[in-house]
Structure formats: C-alpha cells, structure tokens
Image (cartoon, rainbow, N blue to C red):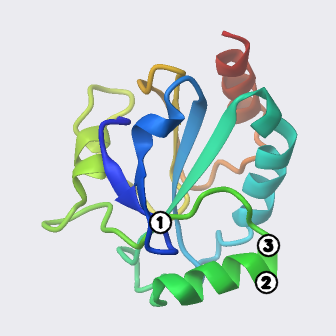
Amino acid sequence: MLDFTMKRVDGTEQPLTDYQGKVVMMVNVASKCGLTPQYKGLQALYEKYNGQGLEILGFPANNFMGQEPGTDDEIATFCDMNYNVTFPLFSKISVKGDDIHPLYKAITTAPDPIGGDVQWNFQKYLLDRKGNAVAKFLPMVTPEDPALIEALEAQLAS
C-alpha cells in the first residue's frame, strides 16, 4: 500500500515509501461529519504511539454527503484550529466511485477482511511495518476502541 506518492495538504509530494518500517493507520477524514470528533482520538493515538513507530495518514474525502467540501488550505486550518492535528494530512482524494484514487482502489480490492467499499468517513486501515494491510476498522469504531488499540499495539510490538 506504500507504493504511491501522494500530495500533502501543503502541496508537497510525499512518497508513502517514506513510511516503510512504520506501523501506518490510513483514515479517510471529513470536517463536517458526525464522526469528525474522532480527529481528537486520532491525534491522541498519534501523540501516544508516534515515538514507537506509528504514523497516522489522514486522507480528506468528499464522497459521503458532501461532508468535506473545503479546499486543502481550509481543511488544514480546520484540523489545526479545532483538533491541533499534527499527523500528516494529504490533499483531498476520492475513496470510492468512478474517480477512486489508486491507493484506495488497491486497498478496497484487497482480499477479505480488508477489501470492500469504504463505508463512510473515518474508516481506518492498519498497515504493518512492511506496508501490508492487516486490519480494517469501520467508521463507528473509535480510535479509543479496545480492539483497535490491541491490533495497533500488536503491530508496534512486532
């Protein structure tokens, strides 16, 4: 999943191979969603586990009821002002449909239990240190969920 180069919200190109050797959580995010407060939990995870090798990658997407209408600058400002987000945020992409980004095409076409359509904003994918998707957490699973924490800590320990 790390064989892509993505544009950050600041416009710089970021090869995802830079995260090789890290445990990565990919999340499609949105600013005007009932699940938007999950940014707080994601930031807390990042602060707690980043020193142990966790990277959280936020991918804004406007695929669900127009809940991410902003520009990259507006998204970055919103995340900074409201949630003090310091984990990497990328330029807005599509995570489903005819214009799905190749990164999300790759992960959604993976074998079960990883594959399948993104259900809503804040769906989370956990990647091992080699960039392989090892777990999927549906949008309603919060960053504080014990099953998510257990899977995350198991990957960090390996």
* Front disc: 3 or 1: 1
Give percent across and percent down for residue 43. Answer: 77, 56
Q: Residue at x 56, y 64 (%)?
A: 89
Callout 2 amino acid: Met
Q: Which mark is first along the chain, 2 or 1?
A: 1
Number of the label disc, if any, that sits on residue 8? 1
What is the spatial separation of the Cα atoms under label 2 and label 3, in whole angstroms? 6 Å
- Element type where label 3 sits in the image: helix
Give percent across and percent down for residue 30. Answer: 54, 74
Give percent across and percent down for residue 69. Answer: 45, 89
**CB-based contact (under 8 Å), mark 2 and mark 3:** no
* Disc 3 target residue: 83
If the image is split into quadrants, where does the C terminus sit? top right
Q: Which mark is first along the chain, 1 or 3?
A: 1
Q: Residue at x 37, y 57 (%)?
A: 6
Q: Residue at x 32, y 27 (%)?
A: 112
* Front disc: 1 or 2: 1
* Disc 2 target residue: 81
Q: Residue at x 30, y 67 (%)?
A: 94
What is the spatial separation of the Cα atoms under label 3 and label 1, in whole angstroms? 18 Å
